[in-house]
Amino acid sequence: MKRKIIVGITGASGSIYSKVLLDKLSLLQNDLEKVGVVMSDNAKQVWEYELHNSDYTKYNFDFYDKNNFMAPFASGSAKYDTMIIAPCSMGTLARIATGVSNDLMTRAADVILKERRKLIMVVRDTPFSLIHINNMKTVTEAGGIICPANPSFYSLPKTFEEMAATVVDRTLDLAGFETSSYRWSE
């Protein structure tokens, strides 16, 4: 069965994570029925600042305006099975943890949680305040998965993208995709 995935991209620093995620999802097209992407305005600005391009416009996925509540994944009836927010800002985390669905990204996350589907949030901030930790606890108790953007180094990444891929590969594992990536002691 082909998967229907939502990708949320917030304005948190770490656009490399969303770029590598979109690149890897492009390679998984045979496993995907649909990929819906929602980016905040800040996400576009941060992408352009950090990556020095606007290549997010070049992906062959369905992009939705952050205020488009007519997007299919604004309802559970569309049966999107997974949402990955990468990077996930602490503000987005807080709105999701408290049930504030004031834009398409937070509405989609709310739908995923209420339908008991998979929400994976690649949080990108440091250090964490107690408020952040409590919000992560709340989302986890609601069924979400917090996957901090902490790269691993045992694969000996040689480039910026390879380092980001250690997080994205783990995220895709959590989402249930079969990917080839470095595995400890294999």
Image (spheres, rainbow, N blue to C red):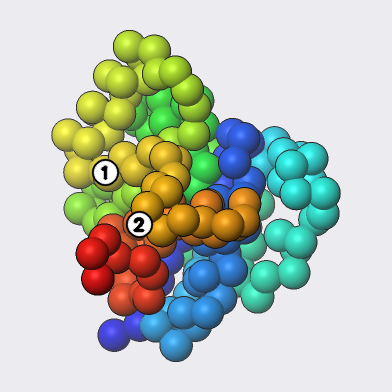
**Residue 134 x/y as whole percent:** 28, 19
Front: mark 1 or 2 = 2
In this view of the protein, which residue sits in the foreground, 109 or 149?
Answer: 149
The answer to whether residue 94 is left or right of residue 115 is: right
Q: Quadrant of the N terminus?
A: bottom left
Residue 95, picture quadrant:
top left
Determine the residue positioned at 63% across, 46% down: 15
Residue 58, picture quadrant:
bottom right
**In the picture shown, does residue 10 fall above or below 99?**
below
Q: Quadrant of the C terminus?
A: bottom left
The answer to whether residue 46 is left or right of residue 157 is: right
Which mark, by number, is residue 105?
A: none
**Residue 184 x/y as whole percent:** 26, 61
Which mark, by number, is residue 144?
A: 1
**Residue 7 x/y as whole percent:** 50, 57
Residue 121, picture quadrant:
top left
Measured in 3D between alpha carbons, the distance from the residue under mark 1 to the one under mark 2, in whole angstroms, is 15 Å
Looking at the rendered structure, the secondary structure element under dot 1 is: loop
**In the picture shown, does residue 88 fall above or below 82?**
above
Q: Residues within 10 Å of mark 2 (few under 14, many from 20)?
A: some
Q: Amino acid at mark 2?
A: Arg
In this view of the protein, which residue sits in the foreground, 176 or 156?
Answer: 156
Q: Is residue 83 visible?
A: no
Q: Amino acid at mark 1?
A: Gly
- Residue under label 2: 170
**In the picture shown, does residue 160 fall above or below 3?**
above
Determine the residue positioned at 65% across, 75% down: 60
Looking at the rendered structure, the secondary structure element under dot 2 is: helix
The answer to whether residue 103 is left or right of residue 93 is: right
Determine the residue positioned at 49% across, 38% down: 88
Q: Residues within 10 Å of mark 1 (few under 14, many from 20)?
A: many
**Residue 94 x/y as whole percent:** 41, 25
